[in-house]
Amino acid sequence: MSEESKKGSMESLINGYIRRELVNKPDFQLKNDAPLFESKVLDSRSLLKLVMFVEKEFRVAVGPEELFPENFETVDRICSFLRAKQEKKE
């Protein structure tokens, strides 16, 4: 799988999870650069659900010290955060 398709698939998986499980509207349009907290897509409870999903899906551990809004501000920021964690793991 190319780096570009891996990149797109991570964004797609996270975006799809947010639409299906957190917003509960599969047809909801969510841009990868949309502010998730400001637009009320994420709150503290849904953030924890999202963290559990990404930990399982991408096999990373997210510590309490990493639960900053900056890391989860947009789908793009979430993916950058996860990729950095995966690189450290390798």
Image (spheres, rainbow, N blue to C red):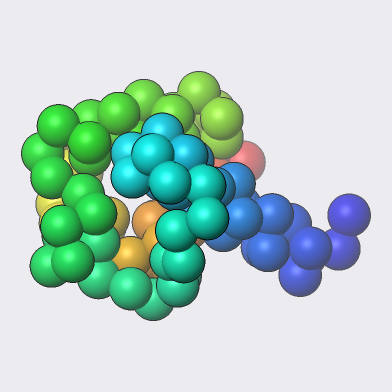
Q: Quadrant of residue 75?
A: bottom left
Residue at 14% across, 52% down: 68
With 53 as the anchor, is 47 left or right in this view? left
* Residue 19 place in picture, x, y as percent: 44, 48
With 25 as the anchor, is 65 left or right in this view? left
* Residue 74 place in picture, x, y as percent: 33, 65
Q: Residue lying furthest right in this view?
A: 1
Residue at 52% across, 47% down: 26
Residue at 79% across, 63% down: 5
Say if 46 sits above or below 25 in the image. above
* Residue 11 place in picture, x, y as percent: 56, 58
* Residue 45 place in picture, x, y as percent: 14, 32
Q: Quadrant of residue 58?
A: top right
Return the residue nearer the eye: 58 or 35: 35
Where is the C terminus found, in terms of image quarters? top right
Q: Quadrant of residue 67?
A: top left
Judge whether residue 72 can be spotted in this image. Answer: yes
With 63 as the anchor, is 83 left or right in this view? right
Residue at 86% across, 63% down: 2
Return the residue nearer the eye: 58 or 24: 24
Return the residue nearer the eye: 77 or 29: 29
